[in-house]
Image (cartoon, rainbow, N blue to C red):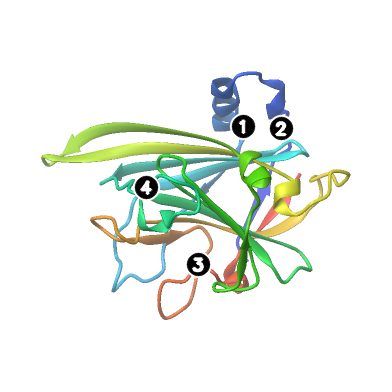
Amino acid sequence: MKTLKVPLQNISHYETLFDRIQYLTEAGAEAAIDQINWKEAFPKYLPVIVRVAHDNNYLYLLYHVKGEILRTFNNKDFMPVWEDSCVEFFMQRQGETTYRNFECNANGVLLAAIHESREKAEKLSPEEMASITRHASIQHHYEEKKEVSDWALYLEIPKQTMGFSAEEPLSGKKIKANFYKCGDKTEEPHYLSWSPIDTPEPDFHVPSFFGLLELE
């Protein structure tokens, strides 16, 4: 099982969003989202990394994507952001059968739910959605006369929104998880993951293929 050791960092000590993002860039654990699981049908590769840390109250994620032909059609939470230029975090507490997904397009539009299966899910409440800080940034440039984008997506996810109680420290926890990059309706559809997936067709809703986050 693929494993990532997530450091304990006092990120909330930094007052501004910019400073927290900068600190996470320097101090977070780095994981490459580089598994092309369905090479024949979807061979597209993009350089994508995610940096991860926690401070016992929040999990901090910072994705960086390079050179994508951008699609950001969906503009309201719970719209099908996986059709756009999208990054995702799926997680499952040890011992639980349900799992949670947090999916964001390049503008920070969020889809999040608690799943029993791909089809059976309960959306997060408005209060839970509001508790998740998001910040997106995009830089455009041209490659071979085509506009492409380098973009970043920053998330702060409270531990309660991940299914932990306010009294539980995150330190010492082990969380099954996977990180994804996708874009079902982008010009070049792609399905990348951190932990490899062995299914006949693209499917991210497979906790049996999640890796492991070990929280310091």
Q: Nearer the viewer, mark 3 or mark 1?
A: 3
> x%, y% of residue 167?
88, 44
Q: Looking at the image, do the residues carrying marks 2 and 1 touch, with CB atoms under 8 Å apart?
A: yes
Q: Sort mark 4 into few (<14), some (14-19) or many (20+) by Cα contacts within 10 Å.
A: some
Q: Position of residue 7 (x, y in %)?
A: 70, 40
Q: Amino acid at mark 3?
A: Phe
* Residue 168 picture location, percent across and down: 86, 47
Q: Are marks 3 and 1 in contact (CB under 8 Å)?
A: no
Q: Could you tell me how far apart the alpha carbons at marks 2 and 1 are, in whole angstroms?
A: 7 Å
- Total label count? 4
Query: In terms of secondary structure, where does tag 2 sit?
Result: loop
Quarter of the image holding residue 52? Answer: top right
- Residue plotted at (42% across, 81% down): 200
Do residues under tags 3 and 4 come within 8 Å of each other at their CB atoms?
no
Alpha carbons under labels 4 and 2: distance apart: 26 Å
Give residue 208's quadrant in the image: bottom right
Q: Which residue is mark 2?
A: 9
Residue placed furthest toward the bottom: 200
Check disc 4 and report its element: helix, strand or loop. Answer: loop
How dense is the environment of label 1, judged by Cα within 10 Å: few (below 14), some, or many (20 and up)? some
In three-dimensional space, the C-alpha distance between marks 3 and 1, rounded to whole angstroms, equals 28 Å
Residue of label 1: 27
Residue behind mark 4: 47
Dot 1 amino acid type: Ala
Could you tell me if residue 59 is visible in this image? yes
Instruction: Determine which residue is flagged by label 3.
Output: 204
Nearest to N terminus: mark 2 or mark 1: 2
Q: Earlier in the sequence, mark 4 or mark 1?
A: 1
Quadrant containing the N terminus is bottom right
Please state which amino acid type lies under the numbered disc 4: Pro
